């Protein structure tokens, strides 16, 4: 492991301290607080006994997400987007990413004609909020689906895999895992990767910030992302094992 003068002397291939605490909201069908370093996101799941119009009569369910940053989640206060009369392009993109990631690991036919909304509220932002939202969202979704099974509404667990997400990038010529805000804002290139617990890719978002990057650099970052995602999946499994939920979906 190589230390790159990162915060707390974190190694280049090390995650920030990550903690997922379930049952943060009494009235939500499933909820967690996820902390990745200084980034903190409250994630809740809400079950609705209806689906969007385009799915009516299909027998399939839907998972969607809403994402927002609280005004003082950053050093300088940011305005609530509702006061601006529109949702920003960045927010829409992150919401769609979260929704896609969780639908990819869920059997929507087994879910039936109901919708689950994943609300991701960033209470403190220091980079990696979309990754934190996906990691926390997967656990919140599992908790919500368990309630449907406990009530006898579902006979089979729709969540077939876990989804893990992490950021990687090149900063000052060094490949780094789990970028904080300072690293992300100065990165030569950065990438967000979402994979399942079985190693299948869900999404890769990669951007060159200052100059094009090579296939070799891309592969090195993908390998680094694998390291982080495997660790994050184990953290998710640890929470679900504590709740005796793993056997229903994953057989581990």
Image (cartoon, helix red, strand yellow):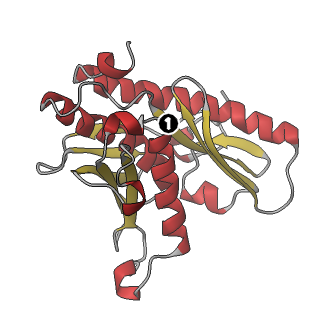
* Among the 4 quarters of the image, the one containing residue 11: top right
Report x, y in % for residue 2: 68, 31
Name the residue located 31 percent from the left edge and 27 percent from the top edge. Answer: 157
Q: Nearer the viewer, residue 184 or 151?
A: 151
Q: Which residue lies furthest to the top in this view?
A: 252
Using the rendered image of the protein, determine whether residue 2 is visible from the camera's viewpoint: no
- In the rendered image, residue 198, in percent from the top left (x then y), is placed at 55, 22
Q: Is mark 1 on a helix, strand or loop?
A: strand
Is 142 situated left or right of 65 in this image? left
State which quadrant residue 181 falls in. Answer: bottom right
Q: Which residue is drawn at 55% across and 73% down?
A: 89
At which x and y percent is residue 235?
A: 40, 28
Q: Is residue 198 left or right of residue 61?
A: right
Above or below: residue 75 compared with residue 43: below
State the residue lying farthest toward the front.
Answer: 57
Of residues 57 and 133, the one nearer the viewer is 57
The image quarter containing residue 64 is bottom left
**Which residue is rendered at x = 34% and y = 69% of the image?**
70
On the question of residue 218 being in view, the answer is yes
Q: Does 171 sit left or right of 99 as displayed?
A: right
The image quadrant where one finds the N terminus is top right
Q: Which quarter shows the C terminus?
A: top left
Residue occupied by mark 1:
164
Above or below, 131 relative to 138: below
Question: At 26% across and 54% down in the image, what residue appears?
Answer: 50
């Amino acid at each position: 492991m190589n230390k790159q003068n990162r915060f707390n002397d974190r190694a280049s291939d090390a995650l920030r301290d990550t903690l997922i605490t379930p049952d943060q909201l009494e009235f939500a069908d499933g909820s967690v607080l996820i902390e990745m370093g200084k980034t903190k996101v409250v994630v809740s799941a809400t079950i609705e006994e209806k689906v969007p119009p385009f799915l009516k009569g299909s027998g399939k369910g839907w998972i969607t997400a809403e994402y927002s940053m609280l005004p003082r989640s950053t050093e300088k206060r940011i305005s609530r987007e509702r006061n601006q009369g529109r949702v920003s392009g960045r927010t829409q993109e992150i919401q769609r990413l979260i929704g896609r990631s969780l639908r990819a690991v869920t059997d929507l036919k087994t879910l039936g004609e109901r919708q689950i909304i994943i609300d991701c509220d960033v209470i403190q932002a220091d980079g990696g909020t979309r990754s934190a939202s996906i990691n926390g969202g997967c656990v919140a979704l599992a908790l919500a689906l368990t309630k449907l099974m406990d009530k006898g509404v579902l006979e089979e667990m729709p969540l077939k895999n876990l989804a893990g997400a992490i950021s990687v990038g090149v900063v000052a010529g060094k490949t780094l895992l789990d970028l904080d805000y300072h690293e992300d804002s100065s990165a030569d290139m950065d990438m967000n990767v979402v994979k399942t617990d079985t190693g299948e890719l869900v999404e890769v978002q990669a951007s060159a910030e200052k100059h094009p990057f090579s296939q070799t650099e891309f592969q090195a970052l993908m390998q680094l992302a694998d390291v982080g995602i495997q660790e994050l999946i184990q953290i998710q499994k640890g929470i679900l094992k504590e709740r005796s939920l793993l056997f229903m979906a994953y057989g581990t």
